Amino acid sequence: MDIPSIPLGYWIESSLTWLTSEYSLITRAISRVTQTGIGGLNDGLMWLPPWALLAIIALLCWKAASPRLAIGAAAGMALIWNLGLWDPMIETLTLVVIATLVAVVMAIPVGIAAALSQRLYRVIMPILDFMQTMPAFVYLIPAIPFFGIGSVSAIFATVIFSMPPAIRFTTLGIRQVPVELIEAADAYGATRSQKLFKVQLPLSLPTVMAGINQTIMLALSMVVIAAMIGADGLGSEVWRAIQRLRPGDGFEAGIAVVILAMVLDRLTQSFSKARR
Amino acid sequence: MDETRNVKIQVRGVSKVFGKNPKSALKLRDQGLKRPEILEKTGQTLGLSDISFDVYEGELLVIMGLSGSGKSTLIRCLNRLIDTSEGDIVIDDEHIPTLSEKALLECRRRHFSMVFQNFALFPHKTVLQNAQFGLEIRGIAPAERDQKARESLTQVGLDGWEDAYPNQLSGGMQQRVGLARALANDASVLLMDEAFSALDPLIRKDMQQELLQLQSRMQKTTVFITHDLDEALNIGDRIVLLKDGEVVQIGTPEDILTKPADDYVRRFIEGVDRSRILTAESAMRPVRTTARESDGPRTALHRMRENSVDSIYVTDRDRKLLGLLEAEEASRAIEAGADTITDYLTQDFRKVTTDEPLHNLFAMFNDKSFPIAVIDEQQRLLGVVVKGAVLDELARAGE
């Protein structure tokens, strides 16, 4: 017997086409704003001489964490500079920073809402599962008709891919606030927003920061993959090395990604610890 | 009770059902069914049933009951942290069960401060910020907040701890912060939910005394929840005794002791009978100062002078009691040029364990009347009993 297959792919495609044509004004506006943001930040970071940025990062590590991290970060960044990967590294950093900013700004309110409303929680959690388990490459495909080849599409895919942990951790952090503290706030007549801003958010801050840390890590990995749709940066170095079969170049760029990841990870982790 | 005293809170026929259909449970209750049957038939728990009592202006009312008696539910009904299923609660003409959400917040801010069993301090705020919490919520200006919070911290003896965080404090001190938070708020009623139950026995005693002192100064209307009859008798102006969500007896501590309303109360009092209440532990006070076996005579003498006492208990590193050093002996040791005190100790003092009945202690005070040492099974020094405390304790029990 011949069972016709359900045209799931066709439906998704046609609705994406419809979305692209109907909302092209909006996508184009988003594209322009994001492009400006990327350009501005990138130019700013590029304008700084490498040694200056290196010093700033080392100082930041020193203040937020330890002299050891500062030395490690400086050495790592110096290696990247020495390998001639400074500019791609800055491009990658820019994409990560912008994608993380967008993701966090969207994730925290959603996370708060999901923590406070059981119904919303039940709606949001499966969506997050979907967003996280869908192979990351798939997001790249619709990004192109929406925003064209390049950095904006990379940001779009990265935001979707990296947002879930920030939402999850925000929700978790707020739900973890001990009930007796909520009760105490209630007993003294706190309104919902007073409870949120004076008790729930400050107490969940370390957890929220852990979520942001996760988001940054995911963003970094996605930004590298996004080289496939024309995003600049270390990813495209790796991509080029693959196409030319040059393992040496590939590993150099890969090591630069690892260094960047470690610096970002340790730095954000120390922020979340410092709040305790 | 004095007829002219103003009623601050009226509780009238309050019931609370935990479940989805309270009406059905209350109907069964009206047919005379009890908690277990109602639970079996409807799957709902009758937390409180037809509770009525008054709280007078300025009194310290203790609501006392064992776990499951509904006392914690009842105190939360007063400020509507838990909604009642039927009945009315009136404070200064405001009917709490029917207040709008906005009016309820206002009512909580104006009328209720609360102290919690597990302190419920905010770990991210300093002691001072914790004490300011109620005022902050009410939108009081920072300068005034600061001043009031500092005053209330002084009242509970926490000067100098303003910038500490709660996790740096001992349990007793944390609860002082909880109390300061409640006092600073200057609400008209103080609700204390098992406020001292999580504290060590000695510290609990101290806190009870301090609460009584504060109470005599401020005359704040206070509702105090406890499962500890000793505590209820010690601090309550009046006691409401709860059992299985119902009021068993309301009266002064003396009423409860001398005229128990029914067998339940009688058994209760016997269970915690008076001779057990009146043990060495109840009259025991913390030792103001001790000397270590490694101390020299000068150190020991200095400690005595510092604390204006003329004898000092000497313990080893594990607080095991070794003996008593008198001031004269210490001077003799100094003259003899000794650098330890272990040879100058006397065993001529009394030591008892915590469960020693109090009337036995009275006979033990000899003419020198050293404080009696209270020790545990491992010979560790827990505290001392002085003559005055015994008299005080006996007098308070009305013997």
Image (cartoon, coloured by chain):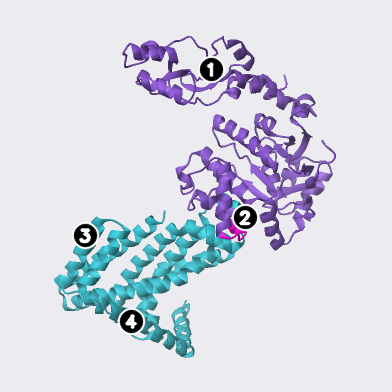
Chain colours: A cyan, B purple
Amino acid bearing label 4: Gly
* Magenta segment: B134-141
Label 1 crowd (10 A; few <14 / some 14-19 / many >=20) = many
Residue at 46% in and 19% down = B312
Q: Which residue is mark 3?
A: A71
Tell me if residue B140 is in the magenta stretch: yes
Locate residue A73, reporting x and y percent: 23, 63
Q: CA distance from mark 4 to mark 2?
A: 46 Å
Q: CA distance from mark 1 to mark 2?
A: 47 Å
Q: Which residue is mark 4?
A: A40
Q: Please name which of the two marks, 1 or 2, marks the residue nearer to the observer.
A: 1
Locate residue A164, reporting x and y percent: 43, 67
Locate residue B100, reporting x and y percent: 73, 62
Locate residue B239, reporting x and y percent: 74, 35
Residue at 35% in and 19% down = B296
Q: Which residue is mark 2?
A: A186
Q: Is residue A34 left or right of residue B190?
A: left
Tell me if residue B13 is in the magenta stretch: no
Q: Which residue is mark 1?
A: B371
Residue B179, label in figure: none
